[in-house]
Amino acid sequence: MSAMFNAIPGNVLVPFFFAEINSGGSPFEGNPRLLLIGQKLSGGSAAAGAPIGPIQSQQEADAYFGTGSMLSQMFAVAERNAPFQAIWALPLADPAGSAAAGSISITSAPGVTGAGVVFIQGRRITFQINASDTAVNVAANLVAAVNAAGLPFVAAVDGTTASKANITARHVGALGNGQEVAIARDEPNALTTANTTIVALTGGTGVPAIDTALANLGDDEFDFIAGPYADSTSLNATRDFLDGLAGRWSPMQQLYGHYYTANFGNLSAQVTLGNGRNDPHASIMGSQVSPSAQWEWAAALAAVAVSHLGDAPELSRPLQTLPLLGILPPRDRSLWWDKSDRQALYVDGIAAYSVAVDGTVLIDRVVTTYQQTNAGVSDATFRDVETMAQLTFVSRYFRTAISNRHSRQALADENPFNLPEIATPLSVRNTLIHAYDDLVALGVLENSDLFAQYVSVTRDPNNATRLNAYLPVDVVNQLRVFAANITAFLQYRTPGGSIAA
C-alpha cells in the first residue's frame, strides 16, 4: 500500500529527508460532564443563564451561586456522589412569584434545660434551651440557629408575635412548598408538640423558564443534565432541547444528553405524570414527600449516572442497588414504595428506589418516560436509561472510527490498487465491522456476526459524494429479573419410578 501525506507535497525537489507526524487516531473514550440546572441567589457572582464550570470546590459554588442557594446545595450533593467527575452549572434567576413560607411558634416556655432540635430540609439543627428561657428567648435562639445552617431557608422573628419564628425560602418558586420543617421526636428534645406549633411551608409560586438558558449551552456537550423542574412546561422545554429535528439527539447536532429530575407525590400523582409523557431523553425519580429536596434528588441521581454510565464497559451495567448518598427517604416508612408500587411506576415511565434497612436510598430502576412509538404502539426499546447511554457511546464510537480512517479520502466504487487516498463502500463497511467488534469487546454490543451480515454501506443514488449506511446494533442488556421455580419433593424418584436411595 502506498503512503499518503498531509503536509509533504508530491513535487518536492529539495533533498533529502522529510517526515511529517500525524495522529493515527485513538478510539473514542467517554469523558462526560454533569450539568446542574438550578436557581442562584442575587449575591452569587455567576451570571444567570450562562453555563459555568467546571466547579472545583464547595467554596467556588457558594461564591458563584450564593451560600444557601439551591444550586450550591445541588453541587454539594453531586460532588458527594460523583467526586471525580467534571461538574458544570447553569444558574437561573428566581422567577416571578412568591417564596414559600411557614413558621415555628413557641406557644409556651419549655421550662427545662436541654437541646432544642428541629429538622429543616432533612438537616438537624440544634440550639441550647435553658429552664429560665421565655418563649421569646427560645424563638430568637431558634432563628439564629436556623440562619447559621446555611440552608435555602431563612428565619426571622415575627414582627407581631415575638415568640414566633417565620421560615421563608430563599428562592421564589413552587419548589419551596412542602419542604420539611419539623421538630425531632425520636431523641431528647426540649421542644415538643405541647409547646411548639409548626405551620408547613406553603404559598410558593413560580417556575423559572429554562428554554433560553438551555439554548445558551451552544455546542458544548453535557450528557447528564440535572434539574428539579418536573412541571410540564420545563419537561417540554428539555424534550424540545434534546429531541426533534433540531435537538441534541438530531443527526445535525449529535450532542446527545439526558435530563434527570425528581417529582414528589403519591402513587396516583406519579402515574398521572408518567402517563402524560413519552420522552426517551428524560428520567423522573418519583418519591413521596422526602426531607431531601427535589433539587437534591435530581443532583444525586444524575451524579450517580454520570459516574457509571459515562464509559464502557460500566455503562452496560444496571444502576440498580447503587446508593444516592446524602438523600433521605420519607420519614414515614409507610410512604416508601413497595414492589407493587414500583411495578406501576415503571409501567408508566417513572423511576423509583428502594430503601435499605439503615435508611440508605438505593436506586431500583431508572426508566425514561418513553412508552410508545409515534404510532401509539407500545415499545420498550428506549425504556431504560442505560440503553440511552449505550446508544450515545455507540454513535460516538462509530463516528470516531469513521473520522479517523476516512475523513480525508476520495470516494470510489472500487479501489483495485489499494490506494490509501480512496474510500469505497466496502472499506467503510469493514471499518464499521471492526468498530462493532471493538464495542463487543467493550461489553456494549453483542452478536457481531449478525451485524457483519446485516450492515449495509451504499453510495447514494442522487449524490455521488455520499455514503448511506444501515447499522443494526444489538445492545447488551441488563440482568433485571431472575425467576426460579423451586419445586419441593419429599423424595426424588429415579427415571424408572423407584424411590432414589
Image (cartoon, rainbow, N blue to C red):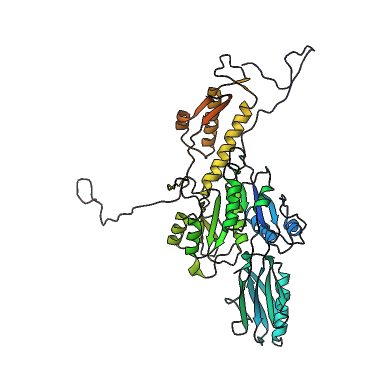
List x then y, in percent, for residue 20.
Answer: 73, 22
Which residue occupies the extreme left position in the image? 497
Q: Is residue 265 visible?
A: yes
Q: Is residue 312 above or below residue 106?
A: above
Q: Is residue 116 above or below residue 237?
A: below
Residue lying at 54% horizontally and 19% vertically, measured from the top left: 413
Quick check: 175 left or right of 64? Answer: left
List x then y, in percent, for residue 80.
Answer: 65, 56
Quick check: 341 left or right of 239? Answer: left
Q: How many marks?
A: 0
Quick check: 498 left or right of 137? Answer: left
Front residue of 138/367: it is 367
Front residue of 362/201: it is 201
Q: Is residue 501 visible?
A: no
Splitting the image into 4 quarters, where does residue 26 fall? top right
List x then y, in percent, for residue 406.
Answer: 61, 26
List x then y, in percent, for residue 65.
Answer: 73, 59
Q: Is residue 193 above or below residue 255?
A: below
Quarter of the image with the N terminus is top right
Front residue of 288/20: it is 288
Quick check: 475 left or right of 57? Answer: left
